[in-house]
Amino acid sequence: MSGRARLALCAWAATLMTACALLPLVDPATWILQAAVLLAVQSGVGAVARRVPLARPLTVAAQAVVTLMLLTLVFAREQAIAGLIPGPQAFQHFSDLFQQGGDDIARYAIPAPLESDGIRLMLVGGVLVIGLLVDTLAVSFRSAAPAGLPLLALYSVAAGLSEGGADWLWFLVAAAGYLMLLLAEGRDRLSQWGRVFGGSSRGPGTDQGRALAPVRTGRRIGAFALGIALVVPLALPAMDGGLLDGARGGVGSGTGGGGTISAVNPLVSLRDNLNVNEDREVLSLQTDSESLSDLYLRIVSLDDFDGTTWKPSKRHITAVPDGTFPTPVGLGPQIKRTEIRTLISAADGFAQDWLPMPYPPSGVRVAGNWRYEPVGMTLVGDHGQNTRGLTYEVRSLSLQPTAEQLASAPQASAAFRREYTELPDSLPEVVSRTAREVTAGASNPYEQAVKLQEYFAINGGFEYDTQVDIGSGSEAIARFLKQKEGFCVHFSFAMAAMARSLGIPARVAVGFAPGSPQADGSVSVGLRDAHAWPEVYFEGVGWTRFEPTPTRGSTPAYTITDRPGSSVPDPALPSRNTGTEPSAAPSESDTCSPQDKKLDACASESAVAVPVTGGDGPKWYALLAWAVAGLVVLLVPLAPMLWRLRVRSVRLGAHGRGEADAGPHTLAVWQELTDTAWDLGILPEESQTTRKAAARVVRLGRLDPAAAAAVHRVADAVEQVLYAPRPRPTAGLTEDVRLATAGLRAAAGRGTRSRALLVPRSAVRVAWAASARWTAVKRRASAARPAWRRTSDQQG
């Protein structure tokens, strides 16, 4: 197999291996077989065109035409001319399929069904386009390194959409394909440098099974680079966003109502953002609600528990419904309800991607690009939309279920219970055991939920503390149950997990607790009102709020029991010790005295949607690590250029004033001259004499008389130091090399000069030097073995 055919085969394999990263996105994955066949035909057309040979642009055009015909044959055969040649109807059909694919992507969660022709066209067509780019760059133009860009683009699309934990495996597959492509190009280039470098002939006694030293070194460098690429991201600190950050990236594109909300974690870096020095107003409310203590503003619900934290599941989003929202899931007609209206104004410094609303909302009037998530009944901003300076009106239902209605609620469907009672295997057994102990004697899920709430809020001995370090991971809830100290996130997480362990559907809501009434009749919601609480599902009532966090929020009236010993506070009063008289200032924490406030010792509740303050950013060592990583990323592509500039400076900087310096200096400047010619496209011929090599450089470089004379003067000096009994220094060699270099660059094209600067061919000497040093090290190690070991080896 010729070198170019081998390179084409590697380009096909690299594209296909990278396309494997798309496999988790669609089910079943049989489309990859179709893409492999079509990609092989595309590569074969390119190989035939180069064999003819056709000019490079004609080769690419032939491959593009055949690719279009292949897609027409597979996806638009009925609309095409003779079933193969695309016409206006075929192009219209392609447009319709792309539109359908976009709609299906917005409608389906991962993995999407392959029955959609639109999705299949996007997958197969995208792989063929990437394959054409890779084949063009790596094979037609013999430049495999830039071919990594389209491969990276293909992998980035897959990595950006994938949710699985095996992303590192697909990265390994894609990286292996790219390294294989680079190695194939290197072997092809080495084979063109003649017998010395290509190794076309080997003498007797040589090791036929071993690769050439440059090839072996290239493999080692590739393996080392791959290892670095895998290890460095693990070592660098993660630049995660703040609480509820990242939702903007999960919204589907386009002007329609489709799309999905990615399963982002809205509680990232919560503890780092927990304590703010100054509480300030983020929302101002005007409401006709008669019970301000129940006016929680819900931002998002977290229903996916992976054992470490709770996060929102990936959900389909639609356009915001006009008029009245659908009835909340599970809400029956027998539940007493009152519709309230709330006018909400967000501060200019409050930029939240999710829209805070009372739950359940029955309608909303809001300006901007917002999308509706039906399961959680939440609104999320699209195309950068957020709440900064926004004023909107929300109609919501104030539900008043009774304890009897909750206690007699029927069981939810099996599918619903399965989804909202799922717990990971990593959850410590102490969580479920404690839940059973706390709820012993309860006769129904309602009584179990009330006992869990009382356990955390009243009789379990728990204390509210924003400074506690519970840690993370699957053992965090167990440590919280043991230490009995934490803030709202710990209480809500623990109660929801324990409820699920009892078979009760539960989730966690994040938003704001009731704010403080003001003198003008409004309600002020501050940073320290940010809160998290559990929601428990009862059939016929729907998702129902509970409040396990002591001294925060307000206890729901329907959780008040008449059992002896119950000390649940009055539900009509918030448990945050707010004053009876309206206040003109934002709400304060119950644990913050005026003296503590002066000393900036007040703690905040949670950082839900907290604007970034000066102390909430990444730590200095994280910034330093990212700065170093950025410097490395910047220097790696420039390493060949920097090495070449350094070598040129060393070679031309030696003056060679004495006779002892004459030989090394003259040979160094000659090597600099030949390496410069090599970088500009004039490959070295080691078998030629110095005089013939100089004439070849002059001829191929199309040098003018002055530059040609400079080249011959350098060649004469080289012959003098090689063959004269006493080599003498020759003045002006550095100037001659610079004059010859200027002539070579002037005769070369702009693209050739750019490549010589950024990707010099002579940089391969680094690999040769590394290979020579490794061979020397092995030789010394072999010579250092004990004599008895060598004798034993010979006898064996």
Image: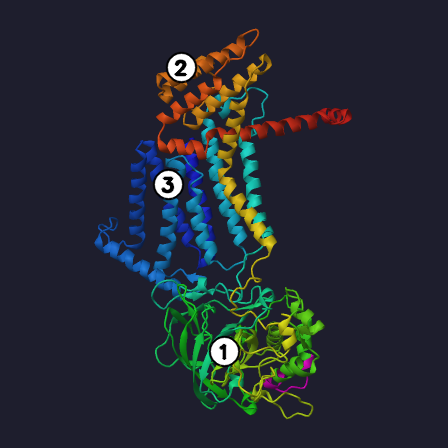
Give the amino acid at mark 3: Ser
Please state which of residues 80 and 147 is positioned toward the viewer in this rendering.
147
Residue 548 vs 105, above or below: the answer is below
Residue 176 lies in the magenta-colored region: no
Neighbour tally class for label 2: few under 14, some 14-19, many 20 plus, Cα within 10 Å: some
Given contact means CB atoms under 8 Å apart, are the residues at marks 1 and 3 in contact? no
Q: Is residue 26 visible?
A: yes
- Residue 690, horizontal then vertical, whole percent: 47, 14
* Mark found first going from the N terminus, 2 or 1: 1
Residue 75 vs 531, above or below: the answer is above
Q: Quadrant of residue 397?
A: bottom left
- In the picture of the structure, the residue carrying the numbered disc 1 is 297
The disc label shown at residue 709, or none: 2
The disc label shown at residue 43, or none: 3
- The colour scheme used to paint the residues is rainbow
- Residue 568, horizontal then vertical, whole percent: 64, 87
* Residue occupying the point 50% across, 76% down: 298
The magenta span reads 437-448
Q: Nearer the viewer, mark 2 or mark 1?
A: 2
